[in-house]
Image (cartoon, rainbow, N blue to C red):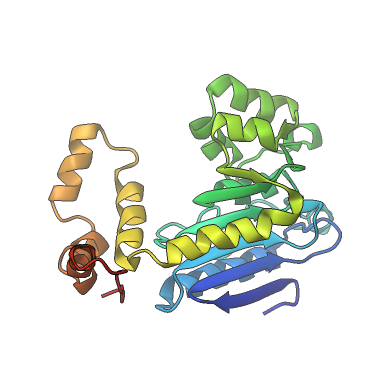
Amino acid sequence: MSDQLRLERHNGILEITLDRPKVNAIDRQISVQLGEVFADFERDDELRVAVITGAGDRIFSAGWDLAAATEGEHERMDYGVGGFAGLTEHWGLTKPIIAAVNGSAVGGGVELMLAADLIVASEAAEFWFPETMIGNLADAGGLQRLPRRLPYNVAMEMLLTGRHMSATEARRWGLINWVVEPTEVRSKAREVAEQLAKAAPLSVRALKEVLQGIEALPLREAFEAVRAGRFPIYEQMLTSEDHAEGPLAFIEKRPPVFKGR
């Protein structure tokens, strides 16, 4: 693994730190490596939650490495199993990803953040899309995800004009989950990760599996999809030891011991 990606694992949690001075920009090589990291994370039965963050306290990620773009990288290249930043098109991941946004996120940095399930951000962070000002489009998740998370006019304002959105405003719109002091971003992300790591693993994975599968369905069809046995992890959860352990632990007034089976 490149020294530009630092990996730490502890108590079922994988922490991934993007460390590319000065602005944690992302090129094709890093995208491929991140995609492999997330694929390995999904396959590793000992890991339950991942946290992605950036080195330093100023920039989470400035997005696509424009220096690499001037040297020949382009949008139609193979960016690996997870697409740009290894996560923006990594379909089928069933374990939760937390973005610990330690500083501002720009363009592709916002797109990486939006691909996570939960977001902790520094109160000093800002988010913006400069793409239209440099002859490009935010096509690695900005166009696809932002109008689904924000009111259409607010999303269009950001995408068209490149205006900056503060972490406080993003929290008010529901775009991010927690806004904390800059020194508390990692600790808050770890606190959330530790809480998720204690949950029943199959329940957590089934939740993501089902939500991904019903996202575009009408309400009635969403119910029918769940009842029709279309989701393997959900079906596995229903007959698992953990499914029985939860109620039993509650009745016995003790913490549950989940084994992921």
Q: Residue at x 75, y 77 (%)?
A: 3
Q: Residue at x 75, y 55 (%)?
A: 183
Looking at the picture, tell me which residue is in the foreground, 214 or 57: 57
Residue 129 seen in the figure: yes
Numbered circles on residues, count: 0
Looking at the picture, tell me which residue is in the foreground, 102 or 69: 102
Image x and y of residue 88, in percent: 55, 53
83 to 29, vertically: above or below: above
Q: Is residue 66 left or right of residue 149?
A: right
Q: Is residue 22 left or right of residue 138?
A: right
134 to 1, vertically: above or below: above
Image x and y of residue 18, in percent: 71, 64
Looking at the picture, tell me which residue is in the foreground, 37 or 167: 167
Give residue 206's quadrant in the image. bottom left
View extreme (top): residue: 153
Q: Residue at x 75, y 51 (%)?
A: 182
